[in-house]
Image (tube, coloured by chain):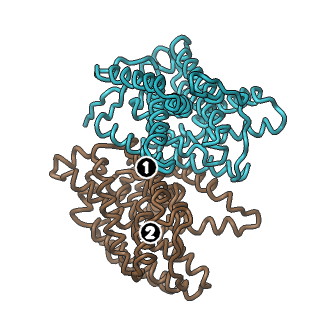
Amino acid sequence: MRPKPATLAGLVVTLAVAAAIALIPFALSNYHRSTGADVAVFFVAILALNIVTGYTGQISIGHGAFMAIGGYATAILTHDHGWNDIATLPIAAICGFIAGVIVGVPALRFQGVYLALTTFAVALAVPQLAKNYSHLTGGTEGLALPTHTGMWLYGVGWAVAAVMFAIAWLLLRGRTGRAFRAVRDSEIAAASSGVTLAVYKTVSFGISAGMAAVAGSVYVLVNNFVNPDVFGLTLSLYILIGAVVGGLGSLWGVLAGACFIQLLPIALTTGSVGSSQSVPVVFGAVVIGVMALLPLGAANLLRVALHFGSQWRQHSDTPLGTEGR
Amino acid sequence: MALRPSTSWIVPFALVGVVVFLVVGSVDSALFAQQTVSGLANGGIYASLAVALVVIYRATEVINFAQGALATFTTYVAWQLITWGLSYWEAFLATLAVAFVGGFLLELVVIRQVERRGNVLTVVIAAIGLLILVEGATGWIWGNGIKFVPSPFPAHFYHLGGATFSLQDIGTIGISLASVVVLWGFFQFTKAGLGMRAAAVRPEAARLVGVRVSWMLSLGWALAAVLGAIAGLLAAPNPSYLLQPSMMDGVLIYAFAAAVVGGLESAFGAVVGGLLIGVLLNLLSAYVSWVTPQLLLPVAFVIMLVVLLVKPSGLFGRTRVRKV
């Protein structure tokens, strides 16, 4: 986030994008509106991952697990306790926050590869827990949720996304955001400048997981169904792909990443030679390509293009996720 | 990949204690003996994959998240060859050759390109991209249904005391341990093995004395892919795995846990860790009523977490000093 005269232009762009998102559903069928709601879900999930991985530099491959916690919170409260589904969102956020802090505490001692290992294991372990405690979660048969119209889902999804975006923006633009980035760029330098690593790392994980949990809640509402396979390893990996393709450490890349994850499969399956089996192959190839060619993601490519390449050298020499300083 | 003497004297004692416990338990109870042996068979599969992870980690400091997906892919290659009419052992050897070449090319074409411009995080993410790509390609080529790979061992059972051991389990233990021993011999007694060890420890110095470090890294990936293929081929006939695109997802977590228990840098530690985890999980699910098959993955995760929190260097790893 830049404390530069670009703020006004940023505001105009934000309003224009918000207006576009608000108008799009009127041109869509009911089915495509719920697809639009899924884009909002991935927007929030990728935003969440960006806070902890892009801004604080702590890799998480397990964000699908936090989505599962939020999704199950919503499903159990509406299915078993008759709650209104919107009212479950704050509860989901709180559950996710607590889970994130629990994962964040070991993350204080792990770095890089070890954190990747543990969060990867979390992504695989949490659906197994949901399968095991089936009296609560419905096991593999799952739980059904009330159905909603596509318009309702689209509206709720993007309203939640707007709130989350505002929270992320407010959080990252000030003191907390600076501390997060300091932790990412050098933990030792951050600690010597008075940033308490323990507090900021766990808070970053907690907030990120809370947001992911809300995304999981909306995801469950859009699907109006939940079972452990909904939150499998693939979901976690797709969130990571979205964040990587959009560009870690960039708020605008989040929208690009969400569209990529949700809309590319549709484009692939509706094409003449298309098959849903090709989706992971294309995703994997794109991720490897992005890592090999432009590790800072698509958002950075755009930014570089806008700056007429003058800062190319400077950007391409910085490590992953450290652009935009 | 030599056995590095551990700084802690407790480790050997604890391991001897575990072995004594297992032997005494097996003599005492036939069921315990059976569970221990089938646990060792699972552990052998975990150990093969864990050693593959360690070989790559030592060479490039990267955890290969695609190791399980690659193993599954090569197992499908074996299935395809058997379906085309090759005998089991012909298909076995041909698959190992395919894995070797595939692993070599993968390092050359993909990993090296990413590593050249990125850091550890970019390579980890690229490995995850590889995982998605390979698992997706497996499903695309061969479909998502279950395929049946024949076992190389006839359905034969040995009886000892009151216990029954299957040739399948004993053969699995034998092959996985034999492949690790062959690998150890390669690292210990051949020039290429020495070059690989040198390239892993001191790349610059190795380059100065004429080791082609980049070739050694590719060779590391090739050997890891071969070990993964062996793990996949051993797992596929076993009814608790079965050949499907996600076959090794769970095994990969057990292999992670095994490698972490062993210290992530020690191949010997990875073997010990793999066998320990295999036996422990089998005994837990046999004797602890609330440990259902669904809970085995979470239990492995907890083991990994506890080792990382209490002794991050594992049983046989070096402790690292963090520098500014």
Q: Nearer the viewer, residue A52 or B272?
A: B272
User: Which chain letter goes with mark 1?
Assistant: B
Q: Amino acid at mark 2?
A: Gly
Q: Relative to residue A16, is residue A247 depicted above or below?
A: above
Residue A17 image position (x, y, % from top left): 45, 79
Q: Nearer the viewer, residue B103 or A192?
A: B103
Work out which residue is located at the far front of the displayed protein and give it. B162
**Looking at the rendering, in which quadrant would you find the N terminus of chain A?**
bottom left
Count of numbered tags = 2
Residue B218: name its quadrant.
top right
**Looking at the rendering, in which quadrant would you find the C terminus of chain A?**
bottom left
Residue under label 1, please give it.
Answer: B290
Q: Amino acid at mark 1?
A: Trp
Residue B137 image position (x, y, % from top left): 67, 49
Which chain, by letter, is brown? A
Question: In the shown orientation, is residue B108 left or right of residue A301?
Answer: right
Work out which residue is located at the far bottom of the displayed protein and give it. A26
Residue under label 2, please give it.
Answer: A71
Residue B173 shows up from this direction: yes
